[in-house]
Amino acid sequence: MRFLAFFCFAVVVAACTKSDDAPVVDTMAMEPVPAPAEAISLANVAGKWNVLVTGEGSDSTLTTYVLNATADQSGWTLKFPDGAPIPMRVTSVGGDSIVTESGPFASRVRKGARVSTTVTWRMQDAKLIGSTVARYEKSGPDSVLMLRSEGTRAP
């Protein structure tokens, strides 16, 4: 009888024991974690940039301008082909981003409207890429348009 009890106990323990035949996960085959973005500085982006502006999710050019970036927070401007330079304010520099504000000025995207913009700039593949929020003045609540700016260094 003792043998039968011991045998039953051994069968139950064996059934409840985890098998070592579980599949082995190859952690080397997993996708690598992307490297953190490189820090940006005003000195890195100082110079003239030819900027194309498109709608978010579109590749049609809405307007172009020349961005004049300086190695400090003063003197930044944007200049449309048919106008005077428009001052830009550098409001933040940190991590991988530079944030600028400009306006209000006459919009080149919506004729007859005045606009103020906030652009978050990042370096990507030697280009200055900007996520732009354009806020249009009008008699009711502001109208907002999301744009993408892409700058290449002027020769």
Image (tube, helix red, strand yellow):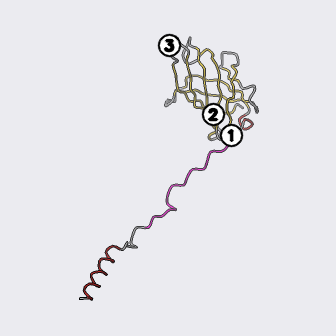
Identify the residue shown where x is 56% and y is 26%: 133
Q: Is residue 142 left or right of residue 81?
A: left
Please state the extent of the stretch shown in magenta in the rendering: 24-40
Q: Secondary structure at mark 2?
A: strand
The answer to which of 109 and 27 lies nearer the viewer is 27
Q: Is residue 65 left or right of residue 20?
A: right
Residue tagged by mark 3? Answer: 140
Residue tagged by mark 1? Answer: 40
**Distance from label 3 to label 1 (Cα)?**
38 Å
Circle 2 or circle 3, nearest the eye: 3
Along the polypeptide, which appears first: circle 2 or circle 3?
Answer: 2
Along the polypeptide, which appears first: circle 2 or circle 1?
Answer: 1
Q: Secondary structure at mark 1?
A: loop
Count of picture labels: 3
Identify the residue shown where x is 70% and y is 21%: 87
**Distance from label 2 to label 1 (Cα)?**
9 Å
Q: Quadrant of the C terminus?
A: top right
Looking at numbered disc 3 in the image, what kind of residue is underneath it? Answer: Gly
Mark number displayed over residue 121? 2
Identify the residue shown where x is 72% and y is 35%: 42
Give how far across and how far down residue 5 sits, in percent: 26, 84
Looking at numbered disc 2 in the image, what kind of residue is underneath it? Answer: Trp
Q: Quadrant of residue 102?
A: top right
Q: Is residue 69 left or right of residue 32?
A: right
Residues at discs 2 and 1 in contact (Cβ within 8 Å): yes
Residue 35 shown in magenta: yes
Magenta stretch, main secondary structure class: loop
**Distance from label 2 to label 3 (Cα)?**
30 Å
Residue 50 shown in magenta: no
